[in-house]
Image (tube, rainbow, N blue to C red):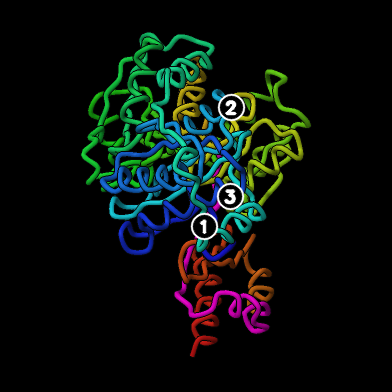
Amino acid sequence: MGDWFGTDGIRGIAGETITARTAFALGNSLCRFKKNAVVLIGRDTRVSSDMLMLAAAAGISAGGGTVYDGGILPTAAVSFFVRRIGADYGIVVSASHNPPEYNGLKVFDRNGMKLDEKDEGKIERYFGCYSFASALSCGKIFRLPHRGAYADYIAQCCERPLSGFKFVLDCANGAASAFAPRIFEKLGAKVYCICCKTDGRSVNDHCGALYPERVRDALLKYGADAGFSYDGDADRLIAVDERGEIVDGDKILYILAKDMKSKGRLPQNLAVGTAHTNTGVERALEREGIALARTDIGDKYVARCMCRSGAAVGGEQSGHIILSRYASTGDGILTSVKLSELITENKLSDLADVRLLPQYNASVKVRDKVRVLGSEKVREAVERESGFVERIVVRASGTEPVVRIFAEAETMHAARSSAERVRRIIIGSEE
């Protein structure tokens, strides 16, 4: 990670840590990195998204590049349209699952894949040195044509009609609001949509993927077959089964991998997860003859591992699920549609019948993440605790001055105890 880019783009509080100047610098830098770049920009519903979009577009135009304004689009739709129109880059203005005062800038390459750290570092070098095209060489800005093509495509990915089934959709007052309900209705489903406001001030505000209890309450009220919670830019999905039980990204990964194997659509009988993927899911996959490859936390790492290995499905516990047959990045709406297909034949509670191991997470705010992770005392503590739990992982946050501790064990007591002992060691190293 560089000075600006974290694990998932540039992110911070709008107007403070991420400003119009940041967005202008990013847009302009893309034109330094690729002369006369064609860049598609999509955004979520946040109040600050218009400001950052316009600033990024100005930076691109000033540098001689061409901009296609996609308006409000889910992150996966930006990836889709980059490939569809042959753009050089796509920019998503969104802070994903973060509160409405936050915003961010994610960048896709021409293949619809998030930039790797090497390219991010090269782009960052131009942030303090703008390039201005001549008066007659400035770029132009166009509206993205045929925005409905994304919704049409996702609907076409569904192999069974959803007529007669009822679904609750929590759109997190974000980018999913204009797409998910329309797609499900197009497929014949009865839709109950909650948290579909687009005022920009309530994105992820006690709703969406981080608050699945909202969709659970609505599901039980309406007697729906399943509930789906997206986040602000709709690249995450957390589901709720017909009984009101939460089905997280780990369980979704298991459900989809198992189904794909049964249909001969799982190359190498391999699924890709992360360091946080629950061991209970790994064991369940093994019983089905499916191997699990683990990567670092971050859906872009999952995507790269899938590209290298040829895997058809990968994902994170947080709800980023990538289905490489259909998309090159996590797509919460696509994932919910593919789950809905399976629900037409089996209840979601039966599909998600996996025993998960208890997991405990802790974090410590630190002055120097690199120094803490390199501390001999911390390394020794992690090694010692690994003998008491199934897994323990200590890593630096990609967006905050924080070290995160993850522990998994057969009991919550064991997981919590190990993580807290390591946390105390880290606190002591700061004193």
Q: Nearer the viewer, residue 390 or 63?
A: 63
Q: Position of residue 205 (x, y in %)?
A: 26, 48
Residue 64: image location, x then y, percent = 51, 41
Instruction: Decide if residue 287 is on the left or right side of residue 11.
Output: right
Labels 2, 3: front one: 3
Residue identified by numbered label 3 = 32
What numbered label is drawn on residue 311?
none
Quick one: SS at disc 2? loop
Q: Is residue 164 left or right of residue 138?
A: left
Residue at image point 54% right, 66% down: 3
Question: How many angstroms separate mark 2 from mark 3 (CA)?
Answer: 19 Å
- Please report whichever mark, 2 or 1, sits nearer to the chain's N-terminal start: 2
Q: Position of residue 349 (x, y in %)?
A: 46, 30
Q: Which residue is mark 2?
A: 86
Res 4 visible: no
Please identify the quadrant where the N terminus is shown. Answer: bottom right
Q: Is residue 169 visible?
A: yes
Is residue 84 located in the magenta-colored stretch of the structure? no
Q: Is residue 398 above or below residue 347?
A: below
